Image (cartoon, coloured by chain):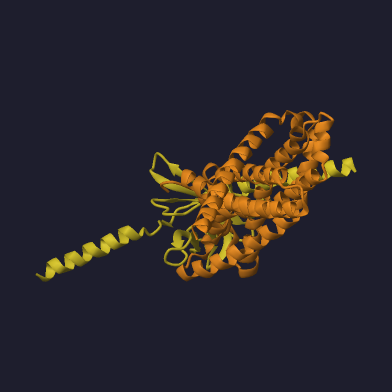
Amino acid sequence: MPERVVESLRGVGHKTVNGIWRLGYGSAFFLMTLLRSATSFRRFGLTIKEIYSAGVLSLIIIVVSGLFVGMVLGLQGYETLQKYGSSEAVGTLVALSLTRELGPVVAGLLFASRAGSAMTAEIGLMKATEQISAMEMMAVDPIARVIGPRFWGGVISMPLLAAIFSAVGVFGGYLITVVVIGVDSGAFWSQMQSAVDFRHDILNGIIKSVVFGVAVTAIALFEGYDAPPTAEGVSGATTRTVVTSSLAILGLDFVLTAFMFRGI
Amino acid sequence: MERTLYLWVGIFVCAGIAALFVLALKVGNASATFNTGDIYHIRAEFDNIGGLKASAPVKSAGVVVGRVDSIQFDGKKFVARVTMKIDKRYTFPKDTSVSILTAGLLGEQYIGLEAGGDSEMLKEGETAKLTQSAVVLEKLIGQFLYSKAAEGGEKK
């Protein structure tokens, strides 16, 4: 019996130490990526290739889900607001919730599962097939050549995707409430325009999406770089990328919201 | 291959920036609902416009005939000067009464036009003289309370 207790305690300690070690390794990896990112800008073609695979290939899922999220917001908002005789305010509701919260957060979650998982799997497989070791053998820095462009490609793509998500979402809300239900379009836009502030709402949303982009790509690249070089290891790392970056997005969103919208 | 890839990335970046512009302008600034060719402007002065906003609808008999173009404060007369753009198809007599109304109890405020009997019509840039300000709910309640209190005083 005591041996079992000792064994489980040892397990807890091992996991804690391992977690802290990974955190430290991840931070050092992130810093190293930043320090060696000169290559990503000197050879910008590499970064553009990564913008293509992270951003352009995520466009369809972003546009379609943005449209549907906007339409659902319009429907639900209208349903409740018309009870109070202010169905015109549905434009404000759709625009504010999209620019402040749903745009960055949902686009970030989609980006993590669409682009982040692909990054992890790609780098994990490169490591498993010893391509990264081969690069080191040829004195090519894998962090500068492989990790850096992917990082900057993701960081550049994410705010653009979030902006597209919000804009398409507002259009979806417009489609449902004005075109289908028949809310007055002038009141829809004028109430929205008087309530949405560029600096306070739109800019803060963009800042959020930049932060999410950094978090998701850093987590995805680190998980891929740190993955055990086996099939099982790569699949585990991909799962961890999606779980960790989704949690990071939601946690960071709370912290950023608390900073940005305090006292309003 | 390289060319099409760059093309797609260019389209993506353009779409992102366009989305930002749409957010900044469409969600931040007014856009004309009627073309400039099909409209004319009329003005009206109000003591209090309440919550009226630019591009709110202008209605006559419940039909939207125009939009509020701009709202300015006249520093000399201390009134609000509202400019409206009206669809060219509709003309209104000079003694049209312009009032600020509310859709529902707490809804959006809009301008209601009630045509008078004058044979001359309002032209581009002219000011309608008969106006009725927005009903401010607090004032209304205040008046109600005062009159009730006065009634109570008389009974004693």
In this image, B135 relative to B143: left or right?
right
In this image, A244 relative to B44: left or right?
right
Instruction: Examine the rendered structure and indicate whether residue A152 appears above or below residue B126.
Output: above
Instruction: Examine the rendered structure and indicate whether residue B91 appears above or below residue A30.
Output: below
Q: Residue at x 45, y 53 (%)?
A: B129
User: Residue A193, how many percent across, how many down?
Assistant: 55, 51
Q: Colour of chain A?
A: orange
| Residue occupying the far right of the picture | B1
User: Residue B155, how many percent across, how many down?
Assistant: 12, 71
Q: Residue at x 58, y 53 (%)?
A: A247
Is residue B11 visible in the rendered image? The answer is no
In this image, A119 relative to A73: left or right?
right
User: Residue A8, how many percent across, how many down?
Assistant: 53, 55
Q: Residue at x 63, y 66 (%)?
A: A176
Is residue B140 visible in the rendered image? The answer is yes
Q: Which chain is yellow?
A: B
Image quadrant assignment for residue A242 = bottom right
